[in-house]
Amino acid sequence: MTRLAVLISGTGTNLQAIIDASASGQLDAEVALVISSRPDAAGLQKAAAAGIQTISLSRAVYKEPWAADQLIAEQANAAGCDYIALAGYMRKVGPELIEAFPNRVVNLHPALLPAFQGGQAIAEAFAYGVKVTGVTVHFVDAEYDTGPIIAQRPVALVEGESLEQLTERIHAVEHVLYPEVLQLLAEGRVEVVGKSVQIRSTG
């Protein structure tokens, strides 16, 4: 079975969606390790409740990003992880981790990349007045939000809705799309060809 290391920084709602999909059999993968960039991240409690090993990285100890990435790579390898899944992880991933897991570090972004890159994607799309935004799952490369795109799902804005309402709807789509993509990876159906990603059929 495919083993995942999930990196978080906050509440861990996408982590919980992955855990639930694995428990229900929708995802043929298990979360073997959860690593948080913050010792007080609420997502650590979700991992502990599911009996998953957790590690928290204090910035006081791992101030340099390369040191954190090196530890993540070491611990993920030690846990036998096949993929690294970023789920609201708010630190930039560097070459130490990318080179240790080439085309095996995956990120979830709340917009249709390459539009609205960065940490305020939902608010920026809302303020811009776009009619359609969405969710992207992509492999991580050396720059923010520029890696090969695995899957995208659109979310149409509703006239008169608030930013908070849009945010809730985007998160709901994330909770479905991310486990679906991780299942494709678990099935070995995802292939990176240059800058693009090809999904092989089951037949």
Image (cartoon, helix red, strand yellow):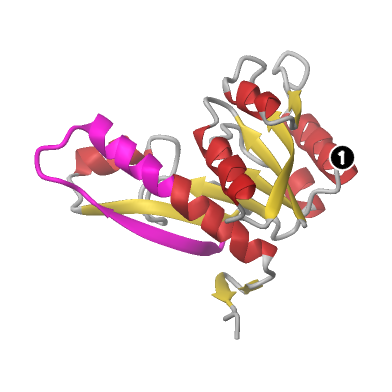
Q: Is 126 placed left or right of 69 in the picture? A: left
- Magenta-drawn stretch contains 165: yes
Of all residues shown, which one is farthest toward the bottom? 203
Identified by mark 1, the residue type is Glu
Among the 4 quarters of the image, the one containing residue 94: top right
Give how far across and how far down residue 82 sits, in percent.
77, 54
Residue plotted at (42% across, 60% down): 152
Above or below 146: residue 97: above
Above or below 4: residue 56: above
Give how far across and how far down residue 175 sits, in percent.
46, 45
Mark 1 sits on what residue?
74
| Crowding at mark 1 (Cα within 10 Å: few <14, some 14-19, many 20+) | some
- Magenta-drawn stretch contains 161: yes
Of all residues shown, which one is farthest toward the left? 160
* Residue 146 visible here: no
Among the 4 quarters of the image, the one containing residue 103: bottom right
Give how far across and how far down residue 154 sits, in percent.
32, 58
Above or below 110: residue 165: above
Residue plotted at (37% across, 55% down): 112
Q: Give the residues drawn in magenta, as a range.
A: 145-174
Q: Which quadrant is home to the N terminus?
A: bottom right
Above or below 157: residue 114: below
Give how far across and how far down residue 198 sits, in percent.
57, 76
Residue plotted at (21% across, 43% down): 128
Give SS at disc 1.
helix
Among the 4 quarters of the image, the one containing residue 49: top right
* Residue 50 visible here: yes
Q: Which quadrant is home to the C terminus?
A: bottom right
